[in-house]
Amino acid sequence: MMIQHPAKEIDLHRIALRYLHTRVQNKTVLEKLRRSIERYGQITPVLAVQEDNGEFVLIDGYLRVLAIKKCKMDMVKVQVCEDKEMDALMLMLRKGNERRLEPIEEALMIAELIERFEMSLSEVGKKMARDKSWVKRRLDLIHHLPEEALKAVQSGKISTWSASRVVAPLARANPEHARRLTAHLETHSISTRQLAGLYEHYKKSNRNVRKRIIEDPSLFCRVEESKKQEAEAQKVKNGPEGAWLKDMNIVYHILIRLSNRTETVFYRGQPEPDYNDLMQAFQKAKTQFEIIERRINGYERPADTGNSETTP
């Protein structure tokens, strides 16, 4: 349990931002904090441990300190804990105080614990109530990221989702393409939905198509978005009749395949359980066709209705 004293105001220059590089600097959140502090002052204190030289190592509250600096304030409210630096970091990493850490932030913190305090993967996992494989997977997030991508995440230029779900796996397969995609994401806005679609398309494409995708990811996203809009417009234009006709054509081709396989799946001496399963599926499909046929027959044909309304 972390022992804390009442919050007190401390000069900003005495706050050591030792773990700033482990935090993602979300510009939107940072600006929101700046406006709030500028209007109401600092409400929630940051958390720090005091060193023998009188400095205070910031454990939690990095975005608040950055926001306070942007407000050109000289003092910061700090809650000092008596725990050792390593223990305070572990508790913060395990429970979180200011907010839930991003996976890459957790990975960077774990890397610090291993390097600075010479902890093993097993020790970190035990203190976090996690197994060793979970710790390793977290570290893999940063170990497989190109340096440019990691810096872009830390500065808030690309999201942790983009880095962990797209850039990292891409870097394992093609580091150069990962670097070029990262550079593009730093200066162009691509939604996570678009980026996920781009990566799925990339994985299925040949080398030439992959090269074109990476040359201009935004262009690829615009083209794909245009295709989706055209397909949606066509769907609206065709209405439910078009959707019904499309599905019926699909069923027609499925029935052709089933017909061609019938003599293979039905044969003399067939085990009764197999035959029963197949016939049960056939009867279900046949019943649905009969239901559709009855519903169709329950309507008057357009040629017979004249100007009168049709009723089922």
Image (spheres, rainbow, N blue to C red):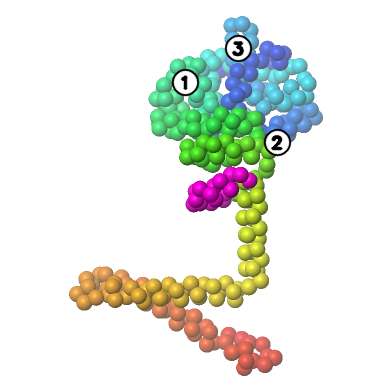
Quadrant for the C terminus in the image: bottom right
Q: Amino acid at mark 3?
A: Gln
Asked if one can make out residue 24 in the rendered structure from this viewpoint, the answer is no
Q: CA distance from mark 3 to mark 2?
A: 30 Å
Query: Mainly helix, strand or loop, the magenta region?
Result: helix
Q: Are circles 1 and 3 on residues that touch, CB within 8 Å?
A: no
Question: Above or below — where is 154 with respect to 177?
Answer: above
Where residue 307 sits, quadrant-wise, is bottom right
Depth check, mark 3 against mark 2: the one in front is: 2
The residue that mark 3 highlights is 50
Question: Above or below — where is 64 with respect to 166?
Answer: above
Identify the residue at horizontal 45%, vertical 33% (top origin).
137
Upstream in sequence: badge 1 or badge 2: 2
Identify the residue at horizontal 19%, vertical 75% (top origin).
269
Q: Are circles 1 and 2 on residues that touch, CB within 8 Å?
A: no
The residue that mark 2 highlights is 28
Q: Position of residue 289 (x, y in %)?
A: 45, 79
Upstream in sequence: badge 1 or badge 3: 3
Left/right placement of residue 282 relative to residue 9 reads: left
- Asked whether 255 or 215 is in front, the reply is 215
- Asked whether 94 or 197 is in front, the reply is 197
Per the rendered image, the range of residues in magenta is: 197-216
Identify the residue at horizontal 63%, vertical 7% (top origin).
54
The residue that mark 1 highlights is 114
Judged from the image, the secondary structure of the residue bearing numbered disc 2 is helix
Q: Amino acid at mark 2?
A: Thr
Where residue 242 sits, quadrant-wise, is bottom right
- Asked whether 35 or 111 is in front, the reply is 111
Identify the residue at horizontal 62%, vertical 68% (top origin).
235
Q: CA distance from mark 1 to mark 2?
A: 31 Å
